[in-house]
Amino acid sequence: MPDSERSTLWYPYAQMRGLEEPLEVVAAKGSTLTLADGRMLVDAIASWWCVIHGYNHPELSAVVHAQIDAFAHVMLGGLTHAPAKRLADKLVEIAPDGLAHVFFADSGSVGMEVAMKMALQFHRNRGVAGRTRFLSLVGAYHGDTSGVMSLGDPIDGMHHLFRGYLPAQLFVRPPLRSAGPSLDEAVRELRSALQAHHACLAAMVLEPVMQGAGGFRVYEPDYLREVRVLCDRYDVPLIFDEVATGFGRTGKLFAAEHAQVSPDIMVLGKGLTAGYFGMSATLASERIYDAFLGEGPDTAFMHGPTFMGHATAAVVALKSIEVFRRDRYLDRIAGIEAQLRRDLLPLEAPGIVATRVFGAVGVVEVDSPARYAGLQRFAVDRGVWLRPFGRVVYTAPPYVITSDELGRVIGTLAEWFRR
Ligand SMILES: *Cc1c(COP(=O)(O)O)cnc(C)c1O
């Protein structure tokens, strides 16, 4: 495509020179994308795994239309509205115990920035100085804005280009099921990091149980219990980034439930609005929140995005949560997991180094990214939309995907490796 570098539209994570024109979608329904040339694709990755109900869900679309006819959005500075208030109530009701207050923003990255600022100001408001660094996990991904870039994997993360500009955070290794330290080793590593550095730590940050964009790696849930105990011992607040894992992706409503552990701060995004709008929610415990109470603005939380608590996004989120429960999505997710375990987990071929299934996520990891050169087009030719990255190809489909559609996704991968 000779003209790609003159495109007005600048695409993500893409070299614009020589970029093949992305496939143009003109309609989408359920798990199916319809392209401008009439071809139809099963979306195996749910638009970066946020379209949990599939596209154009009739009930979700209906509440959007109704809210827009009332008002699309009204700011939360000095004004309020029922959609934001009701969604805050609902999130507190369904979240892990102890999370009692909700701060809305407009994307997962910004929700994580909010969490970082909350932790930093929490210490300051209590008169504790010097707690300005964060402890994160090797292999982490927490978003693309500046603050959270510093929390991403320091070596393999996509943000190493900005190293000189970003604050240097501390990292420990999680006990990965695939290849990592044992649980005991990982806990020892964490304990010594906390021992040495707790006085300068604002918080510990992690994606509970499954690291998403860092490679869809799963670690022992027991680790979270140990993390909770050690963070309490050293008075280090614990932040869970459930932007990827929230809303059922790992087989529980929230991944924290695999370990029955509550964080001090939790961030939701992606599936929150089922892909309809950008929105995130940063939930805080009473203890965090109470540190911001006082007599004047000095201890108030200094953040306020223009689109905070967007009314139309909030009504979709509420309807999404209602449908998720009513239509027994956790059972559907268990069905997706069973099919992936049966048909994707046993895949074996030269180059495959690991297959993983966790909730509604299936992963095939190979020894070199070259193994996946040409896979995207191969899949499109078979009516499937996949996006390999690095040595990983994954499916994280809409939860409404049928077993036939999922069978087509898995069959396409199997065929790729057979060929
Ligand atoms: C996607 C993601 C983010 C960033 O969310 P955006 O909405 O893309 O800003 C943060 N954390 C995790 C775990 C994610 O998967």
Image (cartoon, rainbow, N blue to C red):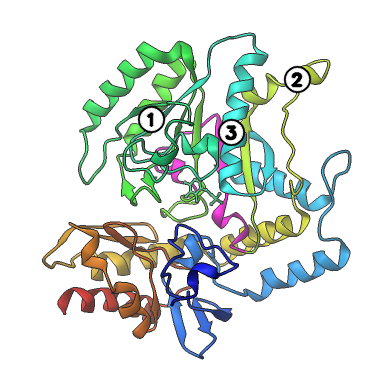
The answer to whether any part of residue 7 appears in the image is yes
Q: In the image, what residue type sits under mark 1?
A: Arg
* Magenta extent: 254-275
Q: Residues within 10 Å of mark 3 (few under 14, many from 20)?
A: many
Q: Earlier in the sequence, mark 3 or mark 2?
A: 3
State the quadrant of the C terminus: bottom left
Secondary element at tag 1: helix
Measured as percent of width and height from the top left, residue 292 is found at: 71, 21
Q: CA distance from mark 1 to mark 2?
A: 29 Å
Residue displayed at 81% across by 64% down: 67
- The answer to whether 23 appears left or right of 376 in the picture is right
Q: Is mark 1 within 8 Å of ligand 1?
A: no
Q: Earlier in the sequence, mark 1 or mark 2?
A: 1
Q: In the image, what residue type sits under mark 3?
A: Ala
The total number of labels drawn is 3
* Location of residue 408 (image quadrant): bottom left
What's the mark number on residue 115? 3
Residue that badge 2 annotates: 293
Between circles 3 and 2, the one closer to the viewer is: 3
State the quadrant of the N terminus: bottom left
Measured as percent of width and height from the top left, residue 93 is found at: 64, 43
Do tag 1 and tag 3 residues touch (Cβ < 8 Å)? no
Residue 65 position (above or below residue 254): below
